[in-house]
Image: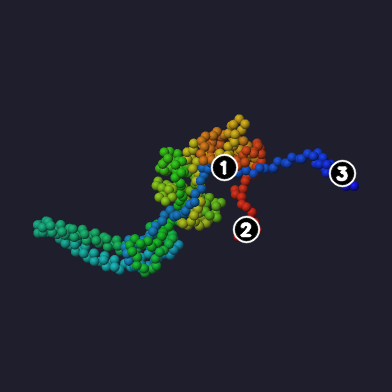
Amino acid sequence: MRSTTGSLIFVTVFASLLVACGRQEEPLAPPASRPVKVYTVDGGAAQAVRQFPARVDASQRAEMSFRVAGRLQEIAVREGDMVAEGDVIARLDPTDYRIVLEDRQATFDNAERNFLRGKELIVDGNISRIDYDRMEANYRTSEAALSQARNDLEYTEMLAPFQGRIARRLVENFEEVLAKQTLFYLQNVNALDVIINVPESLVRSVRGNSRIDDLEEEIATRRKLPAWVSFGDKADTQFPLKIKEIATKADDQTQTYQITFTMNSPEDFTVLPGMTASVSVDFADVIVSDGSKWVPVRAVQADTGLTPRVWVLNPEDMTVSSREVSIGRMSEGRIEITGGLEGGEEIIEVGAPYLAEGMRVTRMAKAEQAIPRADDPA
């Protein structure tokens, strides 16, 4: 009985093995697309347009102060007020300066009478030449002192040097102020300065003898430095800029060169000095390029004939195509491409050995993060 049962089990297992061995495994379908890491080649028209953070300032600005000291008698403006050229901004108490003016006027009148009398006496020799010279010197000195007193009295009144807006007021009325102490900030906001800082690496690429003055000369002669500015939440609206000035000495802290553009104040919204902006500058006409590009070494593959090639991505249908390139030097994981790429192309950096002509790919995520576990600490 046991032998019969064992025989049946053996026959059943053997038959199952025969059936399993007789089956042919179906090949797995190739993936719909292969994930790859993409690298954008430097250069090209898109690379010639650089973006810089910028700050806004008034094209005309002045720190207003009195040229004489005294006590404030009147403040005629408030912060934000518009003033015309010649409008009174503030006045000092003129009492002391009027007294000085009257004293110097009297001194001058006396010196003038003595000098005129001396002119008559010197002709007949009634006074010595030394006395006459002393009279003339007193006259000239008193005349200068009188002129200074008149000016000081005029300086007790602060006038706007140009049309603008009072940006800040730093004092209150009836305060004692010093000469040349900043009391008001006046700005003309009808025209604005937009200021950027250009790194020295970019300056060295300027056509010419690699000097910053060549950049200024290039821009002045060619007038080919298109630039646009956008502001914060108004990023969709761009305003053209004009070159105003270029610094020819680098900043001691940042080693950058300052370029100042100018523009008219926007009419649709308010832009004030001190605000930030983003400036796009097209350097295509002033930057010299030797045509070489540097890409990651692993992006370059060799075909069966050992010809170097890269896989170029077509972003419209997300397929790749092989392109022959010429290579040069290698340095720190990068290789120089001396021909075959124009700049701006997207090539495959990771995953290139597994590609084929026309294969569809997907962009690999920039970074992958582990999924947190429930017992991970917060």
Mark 1 vs mark 3: in front:
3
Tags 2 and 1 touching, CB below 8 Å? no
Q: Residue flagged by tag 1: what amino acid is it? A: Thr
Q: Which residue is mark 1?
A: 40
Q: Which residue is mark 3?
A: 7
Identify the residue at horizontal 55%, vertical 54% (top origin). 234
Identify the residue at horizontal 62%, vertical 58% (top origin). 376
Identify the residue at horizontal 27%, vertical 68% (top origin). 99
Which label's residue is closer to the chain start, 2 or 1? Answer: 1
Q: Nearer the viewer, residue 306 or 275?
A: 306
Across and down, in percent, residue 54 comes to: 48, 52
Q: SS class of the residue under badge 3?
A: helix
**Left or right: 345 with respect to 245?**
right
Mark 2 vs mark 1: in front:
2
**Left or right: 58 with respect to 312?**
left
Q: Which residue is mark 2?
A: 376
Q: Residues within 10 Å of mark 2 (few under 14, many from 20)?
A: few
Q: Nearer the viewer, residue 263 or 377?
A: 377
Q: Residues within 10 Å of mark 3 (few under 14, many from 20)?
A: few
Q: Residues within 10 Å of mark 1 (few under 14, many from 20)?
A: some
Q: SS class of the residue under badge 2?
A: loop
Q: Residue flagged by tag 3: what amino acid is it? A: Ser
Which label's residue is closer to the chain start, 1 or 3? Answer: 3
Which label's residue is closer to the chain start, 2 or 3? Answer: 3
Q: SS class of the residue under badge 1?
A: strand
